[in-house]
Image (cartoon, rainbow, N blue to C red):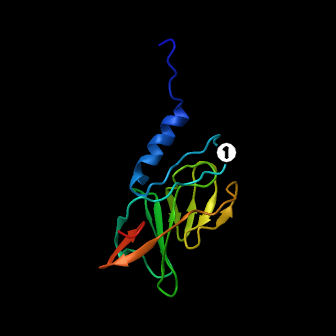
């Protein structure tokens, strides 16, 4: 239709990728597709399931919330956004404790959020996480 601009495919896909993280208040935006993406502040706590799902020294990927939860050797829980800091793509692959972004090949350590392979240069955003009544809760205190 003349005079109306339409959303690009990239804009539509980014909007779809951001939808699952609405409860955590994260965004999957990157202004030019190659700049480092910056997640927003969390807005609500999210129940990520049973604490027993996260093995000691392991990690559990929650695709529906774009969050990975890991447990250190001493039993401490850690959580990170799985929105890639390179291009804003949701990460959907976890092998052992390595997260892989299918968009451009960045890899991250699910236990620390640190970049293991570029093109990303910024670590994943750490999220507040706690165990409550045998459940893993990510996000701000309620």
Height in image: 135 above or below 63? below
Task: State which quarter of the image contains the C terminus.
Answer: bottom left
Height in image: 28 above or below 42? above
Q: Nearer the viewer, residue 71 or 123?
A: 123
Q: Nearer the viewer, residue 30 or 13?
A: 30
Q: Nearer the viewer, residue 43 or 130?
A: 43
Q: Is residue 132 left or right of residue 39?
A: left
Image position, residue 52 (x, y; %): 36, 78
Give the residue at the far left of this rendering.
Answer: 133
Image position, residue 92 (x, y; %): 49, 56
Q: Is residue 79 left or right of residue 30?
A: left
Which residue corresponds to the image point at 47% horizontal and 13% vertical from the top-left? Answer: 1
Give the residue at the far top of this rendering.
Answer: 2
Image position, residue 2 (x, y; %): 50, 11
Circle 1 residue: 34
**Secondary element at image label 1:** loop
Q: Is residue 31 left or right of residue 24?
A: right
Height in image: 137 above or below 20? below
């Amino acid at each position: 239709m003349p005079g109306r601009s339409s959303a690009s495919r990239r804009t539509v896909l980014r909007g779809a990728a951001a939808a699952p993280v609405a409860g955590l208040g994260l965004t999957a935006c990157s202004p030019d597709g190659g700049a480092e993406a910056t997640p927003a502040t969390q807005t609500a706590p999210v129940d990520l399931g049973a604490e027993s799902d996260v093995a000691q020294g392991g990690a559990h990927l929650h695709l529906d919330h774009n969050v990975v939860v890991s447990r250190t050797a001493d039993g401490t829980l850690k959580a990170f956004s799985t929105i890639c800091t390179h291009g804003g793509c949701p990460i959907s692959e976890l092998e052992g404790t390595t997260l892989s972004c299918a968009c451009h090949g960045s890899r991250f350590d699910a236990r620390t959020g640190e970049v293991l392979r570029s093109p990303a240069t910024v670590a994943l955003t750490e999220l507040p996480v706690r165990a409550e009544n045998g459940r893993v809760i990510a996000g701000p205190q309620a």
